Amino acid sequence: MSCIVDAFREDQENASLQADAPSVHLLRPEEAKKWDEFVSACPEATFFHRAGWQTVIERAFGHRTWFLYSELDGEIQGVLPLAEVKSRLFGHSLSSLPFCVYGGIAAISEPGREVLDQAAQTLASQLQVDYLEYRNLKMLHSDWPTKDLYATFRKEISPETEQNMREIPRKQRAMVRKGIKFGLESVVDEGVERFFSAYSASLHRLGTPVFSKKYFRILKEVFADDCELMIIVKEGRTVSGVMSFYFRDEVSPYYGGGTGEARDLAGNDFMYWELMRRACERGYKIFDFGRSKHNTGSFDFKKNWGFEPQPLYYQYQLHRSGAMPDHNPLNPKYQFFIKAWRNLPISVANFVGPHIVKNLG
């Protein structure tokens, strides 16, 4: 690794010799505060550009990270968080950012963006990856292969709680009221145990491998109050749970799921309403429902709330690979695996799952 780092730094030093050109640097721990101050102020940046993801990805999964920033006259011009995932099963990638909905370059100047883009391409070549991936809200390279798999769902929320309830379409609003009628309650948790029991039960029913408890503990530790665990309970029993991220004036439910009772009690419907209600009362203005794959139940669920899908541009510069990756449950070759996974004892699935999903990104 040290040889690659040295070669990369030498390339960036040579590139920065041009007059008035921003220089590119690797983030060091003592610069995390400066990085996050830029991210907080940069309109293009998201929660997933925060410096803490470097710690999360390295500690939870053991992947190498390359968090790059461009600088001119001591001022950051742009950031690009990258992580390298190397797997015998799923290939070798450099991505911004695995395990995250959004990523890519967040910049305040075009020169700052351009030098980061070139640095990432250079790094991808030096690492000999299969592909370089940007997870963009806006298209950056019109000539790069782009995956039309996901849409994201974002919407302004009213400062008035009852107005938010009225804006939920009638059928979905009835489901929320059903959960209220059943006497469901929401509580904020500091530990991951109750959340994980609901989340893992839900993913097991879907035939999807889970992340580890360790991953969720690290997320909570690194992002602290900006990472919240909300549990829905009935008479003390866990019905559903969600881990949400807070950033500027936005709230985003990111990981969630429900136990076997959740469907009958409208637990998930009530859960997302409670999150919206709480966010409204705390002054948040944007509810980011996150990404969903087209033509899935999750996609339809979010539309039923009155959210309109917005395109996501997952773009790839192919290096050693001849095609974009296709590691998702809609791929027909994974259907047998999904059916078999559902039949595993949940204890086995929860033990094995993290070893698989950490390489998917």
Image: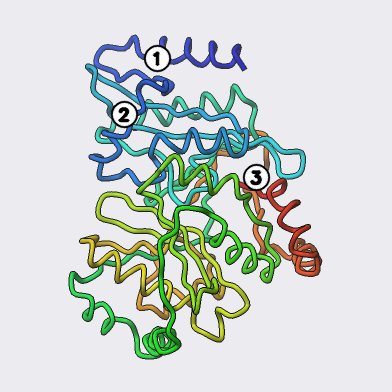
Observer-side mark, 1 or 3, equals 3
Q: CA distance from mark 2 to mark 1?
A: 26 Å
Q: Position of residue 193 (x, y in %)?
A: 57, 57
Residue in the image at 59% along x and 39% along y: 60
Q: Quick check: 124 left or right of 138?
A: right
Q: Is residue 8 left or right of residue 329?
A: left
Instruction: Determine whether label 2 and label 3 are within 8 Å by CB.
Output: no
- Tag 1, which secondary structure? helix
Please state which amino acid type lies under the numbered disc 1.
Ala
Which labelled disc corresponds to residue 15? Answer: 1
Foreground mark, 2 or 1? Answer: 2
Q: Which residue is mark 3?
A: 358
Type of amino acid at the residue the image marks with label 2: Lys
Q: Secondary structure at mark 2?
A: helix
Q: Position of residue 59 (x, y in %)?
A: 57, 34
Which residue shows up at 22% across the image and 81% down it? 162
Amino acid type shown at disc 3: Lys
Q: CA distance from mark 1 to mark 3?
A: 34 Å
57 to 28, vertically: above or below: below
Q: Nearer the viewer, residue 343 or 328?
A: 343
Q: Where does label 2 land, which residue?
A: 33
Question: Quadrant location of residue 230?
Answer: bottom left
Q: 269 or 148, which is in the foreground?
A: 269
Point out the frontmost of discs 2 and 3: 2
Provide residue 361's location: percent of width, then percent of height: 59, 46
- Of pointers 2 and 1, the one earlier in the residue sequence: 1
x and y percent of residue 109 in the render? Answer: 25, 33
Label 3: element kind: loop
